[in-house]
Amino acid sequence: FGSSFITKTIMDSVDLVEGYSFWTFSDLFEEGGLPNREFHSGFGLMTLHGIPKANYRAYQLLNRLGDQKYEACYRNGTVDGYAIRKDATHSLQVLLVNHNSLEHPISEETVTVRIEGLTGKETAQIIRIDENHGNAYGYWKTMGEPEYMTREQLCALEGASAIRAEAISLETCETGASFDVTLPPMGVALVTIYR
């Protein structure tokens, strides 16, 4: 699941490079001929019919980040966490990635994040990319992996590919507020807290 790899690699390289790119934007790629299946292990960020893959959504998620990354990071087993300040929206962002870059065993992980100085009256939302969120490929598999797509099926894939913000509750604690996030293997979650 490449979206966790892309997210982790880019976040770990923020201070090392000035820009990022991807091999090819679309699966319409001249080498190997024109594919006829929507998902065929192509290199692109989008399928034959322009359906954004999870990797595309990872770049979209990263594009939502603010520009002030805090030095302190969370690392525990296969989970990495990054804190970012976004002045444009007066928000704090916590990006969590559950990725086994060295092929270690990986499982679902629940992370509790505590942030000092919050009152618990702030609002928060979460955006996920994993097997069930922002993932047209998983939905295509549940459709029976059709070789030729109808217009209705393509619309359904587009909807399954979309990333959506959902409300997440903050629990007040002694010094601030906290929240829990459960990350499936190779999952990515962005929590944004608005003050």
Image (tube, rainbow, N blue to C red):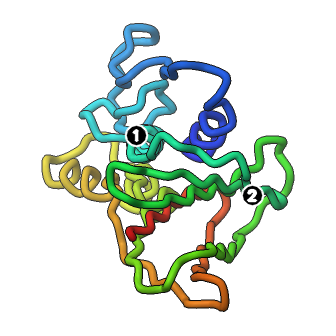
Q: Position of residue 90 (x, y in %)?
A: 37, 59
Q: Position of residue 193 (x, y in %)?
A: 44, 68
Q: Nearer the viewer, residue 132 or 18?
A: 18
Q: Amino acid at mark 2?
A: Tyr
Name the residue rendered at 65%, 84% in the picture: 175
Q: Nearer the viewer, residue 99 or 80?
A: 80
Q: Residue furthest top?
A: 30
- Looking at the rendered structure, the secondary structure element under dot 1 is helix
Name the residue rendered at 38%, 51% in the picture: 136
Q: Amino acid at mark 1?
A: Asn
Q: Position of residue 51 (x, y in %)?
A: 29, 40
* Numbered circle sitting on residue 74: 2
Name the residue rendered at 71%, 71% in the picture: 109
Q: Is residue 143 left or right of residue 2?
A: left
Give the total number of marks visible in the rendering: 2
Q: Nearer the viewer, residue 26 or 6?
A: 6
Q: Which residue is mark 1?
A: 63
